[in-house]
Image (cartoon, rainbow, N blue to C red):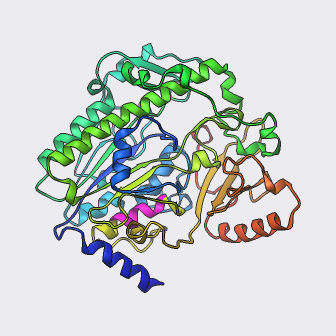
Amino acid sequence: MRAILLSSFAILVSSLPAQPVNVLFIAIDDLANDATHTPHIDRLAASGVRFDRAYNQIPLCNPSRASVLTGRRPDATQVYDLDRHFREALPDVVTLPQLFRQNGWFTARVGKIYHYDVPNGIGTDGLDDKLSWQLVVNPKGRDVTDEKLITNPTPQKPVSAALSWLAAEGTGEEQTDGLIATEAIQLLEKHRHEPFFLGVGFFRPHTPFVAPKKYFDLHPLDSIRLPEASADDRSDIPAAAFAHNNPTPHYGLDEFTCRQALQAYRASVSFVDAQIGRVLDALDQLKLSDNTIVLLWSDHGYHLGEHLGLWQKRTLFEESTRAPLIIRAPGAKGNGHTCHRIVEFIDIYPTLADLASLTPPTTLDGRTLCPLLNDPAQKWEHPAITQIIRPADDRLPSQVMGRTIRTERWRYTEWNEGTNGLELYDHEKDPHEFQNLARMTSAEASAAMKALHALLDPKARGIPPPSPVNPKRL
C-alpha cells in the first residue's frame, strides 16, 4: 500500500514546477456547507479538488485552528476552549507555517488564521503564534466602528454570540475583510519573486453578520426558508447533543426574525466570496497561479436552523463537523473534480508539506491527501474523528466529552463514553441525521456501534480531560 501511495504522489509532483511552490492559505470563519451566490469560491473549486466530506476535529474556532495548524488532534494540543494556547501543552511544536518559514519561505498572515475573538479581537494579534510568521497585518475596518448600528434581536447576548446583523453603508473595501483582501494583494505583489506562505484569514461570516447592502440584495428575504424537520425530531437525541449556548430552539426567535438572520448570514458569505475573488484575480494578474498552491478552508461548519432550531457550531452533527475544503495544486490530475472520500482537517498539514517537498514532523496525526489530489475517486478507508466538550449546566450535572466518528456510511457519537447518550445515523438512508438508530434494537445497529467504537476509542478521549478548561469559554 505504501508503494502505491508513493507512486501516486510521484505522479502528482512530477507535473509541479521545479522551483519552490507558493502557498495561499485562505481561512473563512464559520462557513456552512450550503453557501449560495459564491462565484469565486465556485471558480476555485472548479479548478481544484473540492473535498465535499472534510471534517474538522473540534467545531469551535480556537481549538479547531490549533489542530489544523499543528496537525495534532485536540487531545494532543489540549485546546478545547477559546482561551488556551496550544504552546502551553506543546511548547516546541513546529506549526504548519513555521515549517515553511524554517525552510526559506517568506511567511505572513493577514487577518484571522489563529484564533481571535470576534468582533472584540479585530485589529489585534488575538491568540497568534509569533514563531509562525515573519510579518503579520491586523486590519480593522468600519464594521468595528459601526457596531452600535447592528441589529441584535437577543440583546441579552453580545453580538459575537447572537444572531445579529447589519446591512452596512459604504463599500466592501472599507470593511475589515475588504482591507484584508487589499493587504493580501499588496503582499502578493511585494513578494511575488520569492517563495511565500501567505495566510489570509477572513472574519465573516462569523457573527455579527455584517456586509454592504448590495450583498443582501443577492438573497431576497422572500426566497429565504428555514430547514425543515418533523415535530418530533429532537425526541431521540440526547440532551448533551445540543450546544449549551443554544439551549432554546432558534434562541426563542420567531420565524421571520430567523429568516432575516439567515439572509444576513448568506449576505456575509457572498461578501467574503467577493474578497476572495479579488485575491484570486490578483494571483492570476501577477502570473502566480501556475506556481501557487491555493488551499481554502473554514474552521468548522455552521448550523442554520437544522434540527428544529440549531444555530452556529459546537455540535457533533454533520452540519457542524463537516466544513468546506478546496485544494488547488498546480498540475494535480484531480483538479476540476470533487472528492467524496472522508478526510480530516489534520490532513491539511501533511498535504501541504508533501506538495512543497518538505519533511513534516513525525508527530503529525493526519496523512497526506496527495493520492486523492491525483485521483479523487480512489479507494480511501480512513474515518474522521471530532470532539467537543459540554460544560455543566442545568441539563448536565458535570462536564461531558462528546466524540464522534464518521465513515462513508455511518456517524456514531458517544457522550461521556455513552453515559450521557449514544447516537448512530445511517447516511445512506438518513443524510440529515433524523433517525437515531442507537435507540433501536437491531442486530445491524449493534454491530455497527461495536465496530465504530473500536475505531473511535484509540483516537479520542471519551471523558473530559485533566488539562485546564474554562467552562465559560467552551
Q: Looking at the figure, which quarter contains the C terminus?
A: top right
- Please, is residue 91 above or below residue 146 in the view? below
In this rendering, would 384 be left or right of 434? left
Q: Residue at x 19, y 67 (%)?
A: 17
Count of numbered tags: 0
Q: Residue drawn at (39%, 47%), measured in percent from left and top? A: 114
What secondary structure is the magenta-colored segment mainly? helix
Q: Tell me, yes or no, if residue 282 can be seen here.
A: yes
Return the x and y of residue 89 as percentages of the image width and height.
Answer: 48, 59
Q: Quadrant of residue 416?
A: bottom right
In percent of width and height, residue 463 lies at: 70, 58
Q: Would you say 424 lies left or right of 54 here?
A: right
Residue 348 belongs to the span the image colors magenta: yes
User: Looking at the picture, how far across and down is residue 324, in whole percent?
Assistant: 47, 49
Q: Which residues are magenta?
A: 345-352
Vertical relation: 345 (above or below) 168: below
Among the 4 quarters of the image, the one containing residue 139: top left
Q: Nearer the viewer, residue 434 or 352?
A: 434
Horizontal and vertical percent position of residue 450 = 77, 69
Please tell me in which quadrant of the rendered image residue 8 appears: bottom left
Q: Residue at x 66, y 62 (%)?
A: 409
Who is closer to the viewer here, 199 or 281? 281
